[in-house]
Image: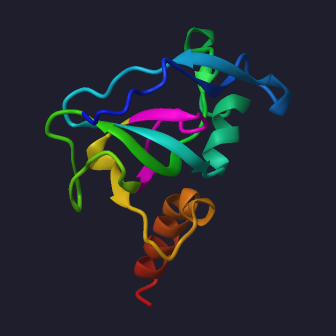
Amino acid sequence: MSDAQPPESTTAVVATAYGGPDVLASVTVPVRPPGPGQALVEVRAAGVNPIDWKLYGGAMGDDPAALPLRIGFEASGVVLAAGPGARGPAGPVAAGDEVIAFRVPGAYAGHVVADAAALVPKPASLGFEEAGGLMLAGVTAVHALTAVDL
């Protein structure tokens, strides 16, 4: 882990019930340190995707035991700390790395702990806003082009 101290808490968006956007709330949650193979990311931008509203809207199930439900699956940001053995697809992950996080539950937050395997380097040519929503839409586009053999 780096010398920088992570915050004790952060803000996260949760669904407090199933329904429309009115069920979403901003709450304070504790920040846990990254474990082995994980990294703590300070989120700069999060992607907004159909799966998010499908989850809090109840289209993917409406088990009350799952509430409050953290929202978001992709983001971009800066690694604040890395646990032992934190390694992404492009190599070791370290504090200060600018990354894109994909398939990271609870990404609508100020900070998120993610498996390092879910982190890829953010291209320097992209801002955090563009990078934060790149992966789901980008991967979908690549799969569509591959499926039609273009």
Question: What residue appears at the point 71 percent right and 16 percent down from the top-left corner?
Answer: 16
Relative height, residue 73 to residue 55 (above, below): below
Figure quadrant of residue 12:
top right
Q: Is residue 48 left or right of residue 85?
A: right
Across and down, in percent, residue 11 comes to 63, 26
The extreme right residue here reads: 22
Across and down, in percent, residue 98 comes to 41, 57
Figure quadrant of residue 128:
bottom right
The extreme front residue here reads: 3
Q: Which residues are magenta?
A: 99-113
Q: Is residue 105 magenta?
A: yes
Relative height, residue 72 to residue 134 (above, below): above
Q: Is residue 83 left or right of residue 49?
A: left
**Residue in the foreground of this view, choosing between 144 and 116:** 116
Question: What residue appears at the point 73 percent right and 17 percent down from the top-left corner?
Answer: 17
Figure quadrant of residue 99:
bottom left
Across and down, in percent, residue 100 comes to 44, 56
**Residue in the foreground of this view, choosing between 64 and 22:** 22
The extreme bottom residue here reads: 150
